[in-house]
Image: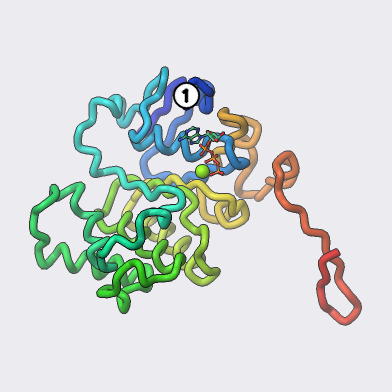
Amino acid sequence: MSYIEVKNVNFAYDGRQVLRNVSLKIEKGEFVGIIGPNGSGKSTLVKVMVGNLVPSTGEVLYEGVNLQNIKDRSFISYLPQRSFSFNSSFPASVEEVVSMGLYARKGLFKRLSKEDWEKVYEALKIVDMFEFRSRLIGRLSGGQLQRVFIARSIVSEPQILFLDEPTTGIDAKSEKALYELLEKLNKERGITIVMVTHDIMAITNKAHRIICMTDGKINEKCEAIDIEKHDFTSFLYEYPVKKVKHQHNNNGSVEHV
Ligand SMILES: Nc1ncnc2c1ncn2[C@@H]1O[C@H](COP(=O)(O)OP(=O)(O)OP(=O)(O)O)[C@@H](O)[C@H]1O
Ligand SMILES: [Mg+2]
């Protein structure tokens, strides 16, 4: 039995079909990347997998149990795409926002213990935002806010972490730190990670496996590609990937042409 099984899932928004008979399996401890063009259904698939959307037909099973029958879903953590469209004028401090990641498990209105706050601070240190802990979130840059949301999604020590384009808007240094963090959470704590991204090179380096979506379907051809060999070239050009031509000049500089 797989840890997660998506079985023949169809999903439509207002009668317009977006997921078409999607089936996939994810094993415990895997680090899986999901890639595909804009509008191909990646975010919708993730929302179905975390239970925010209910499939029109088909089912999502966790260790054989239909997600619809699992009441306590606090073992699942989900960082939605564009989290920072979240009302950032909400008058909460950085540490308060991160502590919200603990409520799913503790229940709302429970006071946080000293250990809970330690976890909040540790998560903030991991994303290098500890110094900002008392600042109101409305006074952060977009990338800083995204790092706060990443801290919130890991603070509860979930068993499975879904991240939908978490690196959008964050700088190269933080992006590298995030990938290293995810790798560590995966290797050392055995957290299963499912990450949607357009950053094909980075995800190919870090993930165990890549799932490709095209037009609401899993692209099996892409799944068969050997990730060890990074053999994405043939597949890549079927996608609207921006190809940048460049030439090496005699003086050693590189110029885009
Ligand atoms: N709330 C919604 N209501 C209606 N249609 C939607 C909604 N959300 C997404 N869609 C449509 O469903 C399709 C799949 O969207 P989805 O967000 O899953 O794509 P995606 O692969 O995550 O794209 P991106 O790379 O741009 O994030 C798109 O055609 C989109 O316009
Ligand atoms: Mg998306």
Query: Where in the figure is residue 44, as x and y percent of width and height?
Result: 46, 35
* Amino acid on which the number 1 mark rests in the picture: Asp
Q: Nearer the viewer, residue 168 or 181?
A: 168
- Name the quarter where the C terminus is drawn: bottom right
Query: Looking at this rendering, what residue extends furthest in the right direction?
Result: 250
Q: Quadrant of residue 240?
A: top right
- Name the quarter where the N terminus is drawn: top left
Q: Residue at x 25, y 54 (%)?
A: 101
Above/below status of 61 relative to 119:
above
Q: Residue at x 27, y 58 (%)?
A: 155
Ligand 1 has an atom within 8 Å of the beta carbon of the residue at disc 1: yes
Query: Looking at this rendering, what residue extends furthest in the top direction?
Result: 57
Query: Where in the figure is residue 243, as x and y percent of width and height?
Result: 77, 53
Helix, strand or loop status at disc 1: loop
Q: How is the image coloured?
A: rainbow
Query: Looking at this rendering, what residue extends furthest in the bottom direction?
Result: 251
Above/below status of 147 relative to 243:
below
Q: Quadrant of residue 142?
A: bottom left
Q: Nearer the viewer, residue 14 or 187?
A: 14
Above/below status of 156 relative to 16:
below
Query: Where in the figure is residue 85, as x and y percent of width and height?
Result: 42, 54
In the rendered image, which residue does mark 1 sit on?
Answer: 14
Q: Is residue 29 left or right of residue 168?
A: left
Above/below status of 185 relative to 70:
below
Q: Quadrant of residue 156?
A: bottom left
Image mark count: 1
Q: Residue at x 54, y 50 (%)?
A: 197
Query: Looking at this rendering, what residue extends furthest in the front direction?
Result: 89
